[in-house]
Every structure is written in C-alpha cells, then in structure tokens.
Image (tube, helix red, strand yellow):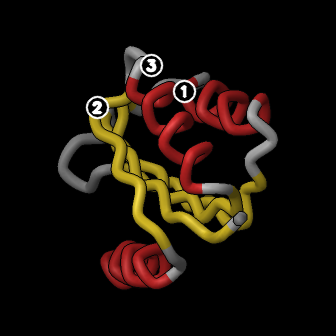
Amino acid sequence: MKQDFTIQLSSENNFSVLNRIINILNRRRVRIKKLMGFEDENDFRKGGIILLVHTTADLAEKCKRQLEKLIEVEDVNVQEGMAQYLELSERIVDVD
C-alpha cells in the first residue's frame, strides 16, 4: 500500500546532483509531492534535500539504497510519514 515517506539526504552542492536524485526516483515511478533543497550555512559546498514522496515501503528502501550509491551523496534517511518533512522544513525556513 502506498503512503508518504520523508527522504532527507545531505550531499555536495554540485550542478547535476539534484538532477540525478530526481532521475532515480522517476525511474521507479516514485511520486515526489514536495521537495526542498538548501545550502549548508557553514559551507557553501555542502547542501541537503528534503523530499516528501508517495510510494510503498519496499520501493522507498530500494530508492534509499540507490541514492546512497551516488558519489556526491553522504547520508540518506528515510522515515515514514509527513510529520518529519514538516518539522525539517520549518527548521530550515526559520534559520533563513
């Protein structure tokens, strides 16, 4: 059964990394509901992405493993539900 998942990842701030992340999700027909990208306030070469996706638990884990294989990606966390997305996005918006 499909449900919402929050994917949080940190990566290097390169030109094509966001494109490759979205391509991984699109290849598996994962619906991206919301996406927020941000730059690390201490180091402009690092950044992160928070995604709210609608998919199955099995497919979310497969996407996590595939995202971890990208060279620029340092860390990937997948959590069930929308609450984590809202909490993280509020924290990022309040900092700016």
Q: Are marks 3 and 1 in contact (CB under 8 Å)?
A: yes
User: Could you say which disc has been placed on residue 74 in the image?
Assistant: 2
Please tell me in which quadrant of the rendered image residue 52 appears. bottom right
Instruction: State which tag comes first along the sequence, 2 or 1.
Output: 1
In this rendering, is residue 33 above or below 57?
below
Q: Name the foreground residue: 6 vs 60.
A: 60
Indicate the amino acid at tag 2: Glu
> Which residue bears the numbered disc 1?
17
The amino acid marked with disc number 3 is Leu
Other-residue count near label 2 (Cα within 10 Å), few / some / many at <14 / 14–19 / ≥20: some
Residue linked to disc 3? 70
Measure the C-alpha gap from mark 3 to mark 2.
8 Å
**Which of disc 1 and disc 3 is earlier in sequence?**
1
Vertical placement of residue 11 versus 89, above or below: above
Q: Position of residue 21 (x, y in %)?
A: 60, 33
Q: What label sits on residue 59 in the rendered view? A: none
In the rendered picture of this protein, how many numbered marks are placed on residues? Answer: 3
Between 16 and 76, the one lying in front of the other is 76
Quadrant of the frame with the C terminus: bottom left
Element type where label 1 sits in the image: helix
**Residue 36 percent coordinates (x, y):** 56, 61
Neighbor class of circle 3 (other Cα within 10 Å; few <14, some 14-19, many 20+) is: few
- Given residues 38 and 86, the one toward you in this image is 86
In the structure shown, which secondary structural element does the residue marked by tag 3 occupy?
A: loop
Residue 44 picture quarter: top left
